[in-house]
Amino acid sequence: MKNRIVNRWMMIIGLSFIIYHLSFSHAVAQCGITNTAFKSGEFLSYDLYFNWQFVWVKVGTASMSTVQSRYKGQDAFRSSLITRGNNKLDNVFVMRDTLLSYTTLDLAPLYHRKGAKEGDRYYVDEIWYSYPDGQCHLRQHAITSKGKHNWQNTNPGKCVYDMMSIYLRARNFEASKMKVGQKITLPIADASKMQDTWLVYQGKETIEMKNSSSKYRCLVLSFMEREDGEAKEIIRFFVTDDQNHLPVRLDMFLRFGSAKAYLTGMKGVRSPLTSKVK
């Protein structure tokens, strides 16, 4: 009798876990996208340039890596982006940013963290994503530059992303089906707020890399957000017009000036770089 009761409880617990897992997987899938652009082990490196009195000066480096990992018992992609300014930039604006993101293998966001030393302040943003009842739920945590911890819960009722998961997702858009000027709305969150941002497809362009003779045929995408009631371009992406959609150049429009990032190295790329002009 005792064994029968134990077995029944084990069956109930097992079924509950399976039902929860299937419901969770279905909800996450609604916010995902099929990944055809990259694979585990991809590593990209960049040189950063800042427009200083009409001259482009190298001011630092950036690197991004993506590997398959585990997050709370499930398979996931772990992506990190690290930017480091050099001594030249430190004289104007200190920049030490580290971004970390976990997503499902179909790129639905699970966790995001940004630790940033920008200027004279250091802050941390964190977001935990969950999908109860098929709805996206955010648990947000901010550590301000004064060391204060702020927590909040948000139930947006739609899929929401962060800067890292948007980047991964955008690499998988099929631009051959897009028209110049087409907009793709992407709700984005940080530790304190949520807002609608969007990508605008600007067409195709062949670009030459800085300090290199390499040329790539690229798709051009603008990342836009609303500031003081007006649309503002934040970043312009030049991504290779092939299956990888590698960002080979980024033009950044910052509050303190303009900056550019050029790809300098790559490892573990998923598909042939057919966009490279020979």
Image (spheres, rainbow, N blue to C red):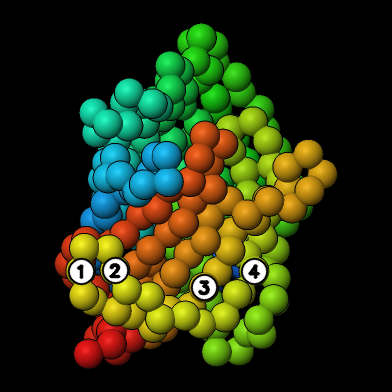
Kindly report the distance in space between the C-alpha atoms of the residues bearing marks 1 and 4. Answer: 28 Å
Q: Residues within 10 Å of mark 4 (few under 14, many from 20)?
A: many
Could you tell me how far apart the alpha carbons at marks 3 and 4 are, in whole angstroms?
9 Å
Image mark for residue 200? 4
Residue furthest out toward the front: 54
Tag 3, which secondary structure?
strand
Residue receiving disc 1: 212
Q: Amino acid at mark 2?
A: Met
For the residues bearing labels 1 and 4, Cβ distance under 8 angstroms = no
Q: Would you say the residues marked 3 and 4 are in contact, meaning their CB atoms lie under 8 Å apart?
A: no
Q: Which residue is mark 3?
A: 220
Asked if marks 3 and 2 touch (Cβ < 8 Å), the reply is no
Looking at the image, is mark 3 or mark 2 nearer the viewer?
A: 2
**Residue of label 2:** 209
**Amino acid of disc 1:** Ser
Task: Give the distance between the C-alpha atoms of the residues marked 3 and 2, in whole angstroms.
Answer: 15 Å
191 up-or-down from 61: above or below? above
Q: Residues within 10 Å of mark 1 (few under 14, many from 20)?
A: few
Q: Earlier in the sequence, mark 3 or mark 4?
A: 4
Q: Identity of the amino acid at label 4? A: Val
Labels 1 and 2 touching (C-beta < 8 A): yes
* Nearer to us: label 1 or label 3: 1
Using a 10 Å C-alpha cutoff, classify the residue at mark 3 as few (fewer than 14 neighbours), some (14 to 19) or many (20 or more).
many
The type of residue carrying mark 3 is Val
